[in-house]
Amino acid sequence: MRRSGVTNGSRLHIELRDKNSPWARRLRDLLALMVSDLGGAENCSEAEKSLARRASMLTLQLELIEQKWAQDGGEASAKSLVLYQRVANSLRRILESIGLKRRARDIAPSLDQYLRQRQEENGANEE
């Protein structure tokens, strides 16, 4: 069964004109970091992945607003502050939905892997 590039993880959920722009790279980085915090793609539900994509985009948009303020000498209009606050609150709600805590992935070897590794080590020591 063929799956879309978004489903199989080979592309972002949006088409980008320039896939190597700083904006696109940051979006990919944010998404990868958020999915990693959820324990990796293999441990995320599709709903969690969807929320992680939205949270990544909102985070990027907040960073772009902050960058614009910095370029304007730190000045922010009342309108841009309201927009920033609304986006930040939406991001907070999404992050609360998927959990604000980082989930640890189990990286310990299985019992079979551990025993096999011990046997290999013992075999190497006997030679």
Image (spheres, grey):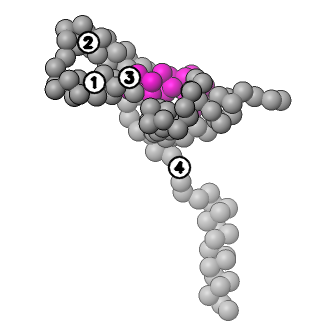
Q: Given this view, does label 1 or label 3 mark the residue nearer the observer? A: 1
Mark 4 or mark 2, which is nearer the start of the sequence?
A: 2
Q: Given this view, does label 2 or label 4 mark the residue nearer the observer? A: 2
The amino acid type, in three-letter code, at marker 4 is Asp
Mark 3 or mark 4, which is nearer the start of the sequence?
A: 3
Q: Given this view, does label 4 or label 3 mark the residue nearer the observer? A: 3
Residues under labels 1 and 3: Cα distance?
A: 11 Å
Q: Residues within 10 Å of mark 4 (few under 14, many from 20)?
A: few
The amino acid type, in three-letter code, at marker 3 is Gln
**In what element is the residue under mark 2?**
helix
Residue that badge 2 annotates:
80
Residues under labels 2 and 4: Cα distance?
A: 43 Å
**In what element is the residue under mark 4?**
loop
Instruction: Say whether residue 120 is left or right of residue 93.
Output: right
Residues under labels 1 and 2: Cα distance?
A: 10 Å
Q: For residue 126, which quarter of the picture? A: bottom right
Mark 3 or mark 1, which is nearer the start of the sequence?
A: 3
Q: Residues within 10 Å of mark 1 (few under 14, many from 20)?
A: some
| Rendered image: mark on residue 68 | 1
Q: Which residues are magenta?
A: 43-59
The amino acid type, in three-letter code, at marker 1 is Lys
Residues under labels 4 and 3: Cα distance?
A: 33 Å
Q: Nearer the viewer, residue 33 or 76?
A: 76
Q: Residues within 10 Å of mark 3 (few under 14, many from 20)?
A: some
Q: Nearer the viewer, residue 73 or 91?
A: 73
Assign the N terminus to one quadrant of the image: top right
Residue that badge 3 annotates:
61
The reply to whether dot 1 and dot 2 touch (C-beta < 8 Å) is yes
